[in-house]
């Protein structure tokens, strides 16, 4: 299909996501000649402006290296902007005419990227369906969270979309599925005989999946307060990682075979219970050393009595033959001491110990960011005359082993997938349903009971209670995580 005209329509072209992420992404794809040659880009939003205004606003987010200036000009020549309201069909008809003008030949495909707030989501999709469907090729829509805020609102949205598009046309982005190491999980597990046979409750004690960010909700408090960290990160990014870590081997690499297994493992998880979750909210560090940082409640866009969690640690159990009784600990937080996302698969203690308890647990660490890495902690004899044990690592740190250019950005990869029509790394509707089934009861309970999160200081490792919780769930702490 790549020889035919394609149009990429960015709805919400004047917003933050568009200028900071989507315009740079499509530029890099264009620059690297990854898109169909005849690709045209349209921005659409309420703001009355021209494409040069869009260009100006996104300028500082787009890297143009020496020698690429001409190509950058050509990129903007392939761009257009069409102002219009989100709820008026006639505006979409005008957009449709503009797109059509460019679609020469027998086949032409369209991709719509919805970088719009959830409040206009339904209007936008209805209007695309009514006025902008390609009549001589495919039409695909890319959507991003929030996909509702609980099971009821999410299934309302799903039903709405299902009434307009086929599942094959809907690309639900979870950008963690576009990250190199998340994509690597299946290879690590299913292309290595060393891991396959030990990947179970007999050998693994616990699994920790964490996400840490060193900044708070600065500027995004309005959106965030309505959602909280459980919906923002745990219910989507961390649960997606969990399903890839825990699922059975798919029948094949076909996207639906993979997603069938992801759904199956999620179906074995019972909703999270109150005793299996710890929530936190960051407070400022006015007298702390270094930078003075404000607390979550000091953010003017956040209500003064908000109990929205900015940190959460939850333990989920997968009730199947492979995993019964093994805690999968999901942990995420904002305003912590560092940026890090990783998976730690912690093996059990060696039975029949002959080393007086000096043999530490093996741990397979899959570091998603920063600095992709895969390393296995193991025990070795310390070199020399003595017979001492030392904990060491088999270390595959990507920057040492591969050139950085080999790791593409998540958005670039995912948007290219949409052009190519592969849904392997996108969330299917039934996965979403399961995710909400697992999290909605606890979210409701926390909200109804107005449960107060425990405070933790901006820039710290999170609430001190978390370490105790980890130990209670058979995760042995060693090192800094
Ligand atoms: C987004 C969340 O989905 O992921 C943000 O809404 C979060 O709150 C972001 O900051 C993290 O993404 P990344 O790629 O920087 O880890």
Image (cartoon, grey):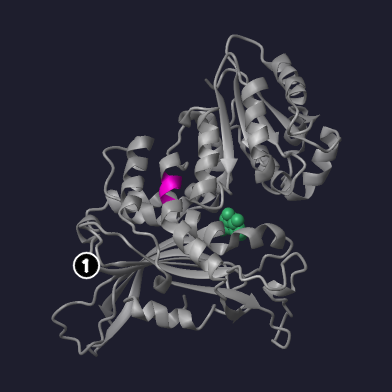
Can you tell which quarter of the image residue 353 is in?
A: bottom left
281 sits to left or right of 258: right
Please state the horizontal and vertical placement of residue 307, each as a whole percent of the image.
Answer: 61, 71
Quarter holding ligand 1 = bottom right
Can you tell which quarter of the image residue 129 is in?
A: top right
Magenta residues (range): 431-435
Provide the residue designation for mark 1: 203
The front one of 394 and 137 is: 137
The front one of 47 and 403 is: 47
**Disc 1 residue crowd, few under 14, some 14–19, many 20+, Cα 10 Å:** some
Q: Name above or below for residue 78 compared with residue 449.
A: above
Residue at 32% across, 79% down: 391
227 sits to left or right of 381: right
User: Is the stretch drawn in magenta largely helix, strand or loop?
Assistant: helix
Please state the horizontal and vertical placement of residue 432, each as a whole percent of the image.
Answer: 45, 46
Q: Name above or below for residue 472 compared with residue 211.
A: below
254 falls in the magenta region: no
Please state the horizontal and vertical placement of residue 413, each as a whole percent of the image.
Answer: 53, 41
């Amino acid at each position: 299909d790549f020889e035919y005209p394609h149009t990429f329509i960015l709805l919400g072209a004047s917003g933050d996501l568009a200028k900071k992420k989507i315009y740079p992404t499509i530029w890099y794809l264009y620059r690297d000649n990854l898109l169909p040659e005849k690709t045209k880009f349209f921005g659409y939003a309420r703001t009355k402006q021209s494409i040069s205004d869009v260009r100006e606003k996104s300028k500082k987010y787009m890297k143009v290296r020496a020698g690429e200036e001409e190509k950058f000009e050509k990129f903007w020549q392939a761009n257009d902007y069409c102002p219009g309201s989100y709820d008026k069909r006639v505006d979409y008809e005008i957009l449709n005419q503009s797109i059509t003008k460019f679609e020469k030949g027998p086949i032409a495909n369209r991709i719509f990227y919805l970088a719009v707030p959830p409040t206009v989501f339904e209007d936008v999709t209805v209007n695309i369906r009514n006025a902008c469907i390609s009549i001589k090729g495919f039409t695909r829509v890319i959507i991003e969270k929030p996909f509702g805020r609980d099971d009821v609102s999410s299934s309302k949205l799903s039903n709405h979309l299902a009434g307009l598009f086929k599942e094959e046309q809907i690309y639900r982005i979870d950008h963690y599925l576009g990250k190199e190491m998340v994509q690597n999980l299946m290879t690590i597990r299913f292309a290595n005989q060393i891991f396959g046979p030990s990947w179970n409750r007999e050998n693994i004690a616990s699994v920790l999946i964490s996400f840490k960010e060193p900044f708070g909700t600065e500027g995004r408090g309005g959106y965030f307060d309505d959602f909280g960290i459980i919906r923002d990160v745990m219910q989507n990014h961390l649960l997606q990682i969990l399903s890839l870590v825990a699922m059975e081997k798919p029948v094949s690499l076909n996207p639906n075979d993979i997603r069938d297994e992801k759904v199956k493992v999620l179906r074995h998880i019972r909703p999270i219970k109150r005793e299996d979750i710890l929530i936190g909210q960051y407070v400022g560090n006015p007298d702390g050393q270094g930078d003075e940082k404000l607390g979550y409640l000091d953010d003017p866009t956040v209500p003064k009595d908000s109990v929205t969690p900015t940190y959460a640690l939850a333990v989920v159990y997968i009730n199947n033959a492979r995993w019964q009784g093994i805690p999968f600990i999901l942990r995420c937080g904002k305003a912590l001491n560092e940026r890090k996302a990783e998976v730690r698969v912690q093996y059990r203690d060696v039975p029949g110990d002959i080393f007086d308890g000096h043999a530490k647990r093996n741990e397979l660490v899959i570091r998603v960011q920063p600095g992709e890495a895969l390393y296995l902690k193991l025990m070795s004899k310390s070199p020399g005359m003595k017979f001492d044990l030392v904990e060491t690592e088999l270390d595959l740190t990507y920057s040492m082993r591969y050139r950085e250019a080999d790791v593409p950005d998540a958005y670039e990869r995912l948007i290219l997938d949409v052009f190519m029509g592969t849904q392997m790394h996108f969330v299917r509707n039934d996965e979403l349903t399961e995710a909400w089934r697992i999290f909605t009861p606890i979210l409701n309970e926390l909200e109804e009971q107005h449960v107060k999160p425990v405070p933790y200081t901006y820039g710290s490792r999170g609430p001190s209670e978390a370490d105790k919780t980890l130990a209670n769930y058979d995760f042995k702490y060693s090192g800094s995580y």
